[in-house]
Amino acid sequence: MSRRLMHDTQYHAGLAYLSLLILLAIIGVAAAATLQMGSVLQRREAEEELLAIGSEFRSALVSYANATPIGQQAAPRTLSDLLKDPRYPSIRRHLRKLYADPISGKPEWGIVLSIDGKGIVGVYSLSTATPIKIGNFDPAFQNFADKKSYADWVFMATTANLNPLNSSNTQQLARPFIPPTR
């Protein structure tokens, strides 16, 4: 009788141990799936932030070009020129602050230069990661569809966005985009 009781106790202890191992495996799989989903959600948020910041840069570049005095360059020499326009004696801002790239987390951006190479007409993320969003973009970003990396999302001031009264200054912005070398 004692032997049977001992056997039943060992059996139940083994069953409890096996159940605990299965439960731990299920919890581990659920935790891994949650972390992966959290990572995807974080990247999606970073993409949305990149689109918003890129739109701010694009608007600032257009504002800078539209505010160009006759005979002055229509594109800023540095991104800092968007914070305080050096062409005017008083403070004139086209951008409130220099944003960090939300994908890389660094305050560095790739730049697209004007035809003469003296001014900035566009910015892009230096991240070569593959975007999650590949379609269904707002009309302003339709050309981002099916791009292979965030570096292909270029936020540019184009002549279509510029004030026609400053048409004498827009030729230096007409440079076609040359993809960044990686």
Image (cartoon, rainbow, N blue to C red):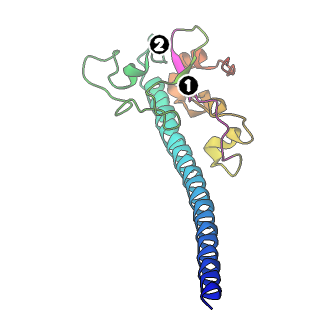
Q: Nearer the viewer, mark 2 or mark 1?
A: 1
Looking at the image, residue 58 sits to the left or right of residue 174; the answer is left
> Mark 2 to mark 1: distance in Å?
15 Å
Q: Quadrant of residue 4?
A: bottom right
Residue span colored magenta? 118-133
Answer with mark 2 or mark 1, whichever residue precedes in sequence: 2
Label 1 Cα neighbours within 10 Å, binned few <14 / some 14-19 / many ≥20: many
Report x, y in % for residue 69: 41, 17
Give residue 73's mark: 2
Looking at the image, residue 13 sits to the left or right of residue 145; the answer is left
Residue 128 lies within the magenta run: yes
Residue at the limit of the structure toward the right, as seen here: 146
Residue, disc 1 = 122
Q: Nearer the viewer, residue 103 or 165?
A: 103
Residue at the limit of the structure toward the bottom, as seen here: 1
Q: Amino acid at mark 2?
A: Gln
| Residue drawn 64% across the image and 20% down it | 174
Q: Amino acid at mark 1?
A: Gly
